[in-house]
Amino acid sequence: MTEYVTGSSGAREDLCRFLAACYCEPSADFSEEHLFDSMLTAAAAIHPDLAECARRLGAEFLAQDMETLLVDYTALFIGPAQPRAMPYASFWLSDDQSMRHEATMAVLDFYEQGGFDVSDELHELPDHVAVELEFLYLLIFAQNQAQQGGNADELATANALHRRFVAEHLNAWLGDFATAVKVGTGTAFYRELAELTGKFVRMEADLQHLN
């Protein structure tokens, strides 16, 4: 695996935001806003493995009709019974349902430290995969801003929070979630999304050895 690009180009920020968007309900807006072209551009600036995943993801979206994607999205992440791939961190971090509130509170503590407010318009729990990816985007943004501004103290703080969030929280559950998506999906689109998300988060985890 070649070196993971960590420059301030914004590619990591962009890819993280685009991944978060893909865990919202699929719509024609994805194509109209050229989401997958933008994802491919960002992924190619980071690592060729990510670029190949992004290329396949965009191709699978175009190859699938919207109704089938919506049915698969609902079965995977909503229900009507238990979703095939529960999109909440607390579900994966504790087998004890009574302890899952603590896992949710832990991620809220990370959000508070990072100055992140969950939008009321999202209508989702704070440990939903899309929300956590949005927070990771914010952490990467903070790292890049501190790097560009030459502020060593802010950069150290941003690096430390990024390191803790990814290593102690996101990377602890995202792999199991991605596996569940791959097993439970009925479309290649969500299988490729899980693969791309898993690779990206593992690469972000590897950055803890560089910061």
Image (cartoon, grey):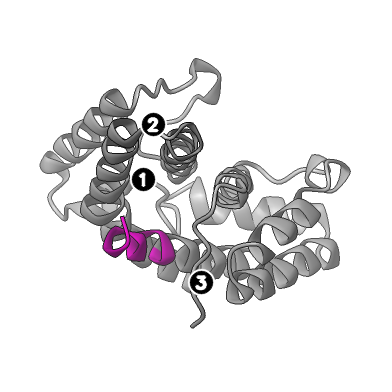
Q: Position of residue 195 (x, y in %)?
A: 53, 70
Q: Residues within 10 Å of mark 1 (few under 14, many from 20)?
A: many
Separation of disc 1 and disc 3 at Cα? Answer: 16 Å
The residue lying furthest to the front in this view is 150
> For this rendering, which residue is in front, 53 or 162?
162
Q: Residue at x 48, y 69 (%)?
A: 199
* Numbered circle sitting on residue 147: none
The answer to whether marks 1 and 2 mark residues whose Cβ atoms lie closer than 8 Å is yes
Separation (CA) of disc 1 from disc 2: 8 Å
Main secondary structure type of the part rendered in magenta: helix
171 and 60: which one is in front?
171
Q: Which range is magenta?
A: 202-211
Q: Is residue 145 magenta?
A: no
Q: Is residue 207 magenta?
A: yes
Q: Residue at x 76, y 68 (%)?
A: 60
Instruction: Return the x and y of residue 61 as percentages of the image width and height.
Output: 77, 61
Query: SS of the residue at dot 2?
Result: loop
Q: Report the residue marked by disc 3.
A: 182
User: Which residue carries the number 1 mark?
Assistant: 88
Q: Is residue 158 above or below residue 168?
A: above
Rate crowding at label 2 as few (under 14), some (14 to 19) or many (20 or more) other CA atoms within 10 Å. some
Residue that numbered label 2 is attached to: 125
Disc with the residue nearer the chain's start (2 vs 3):
2
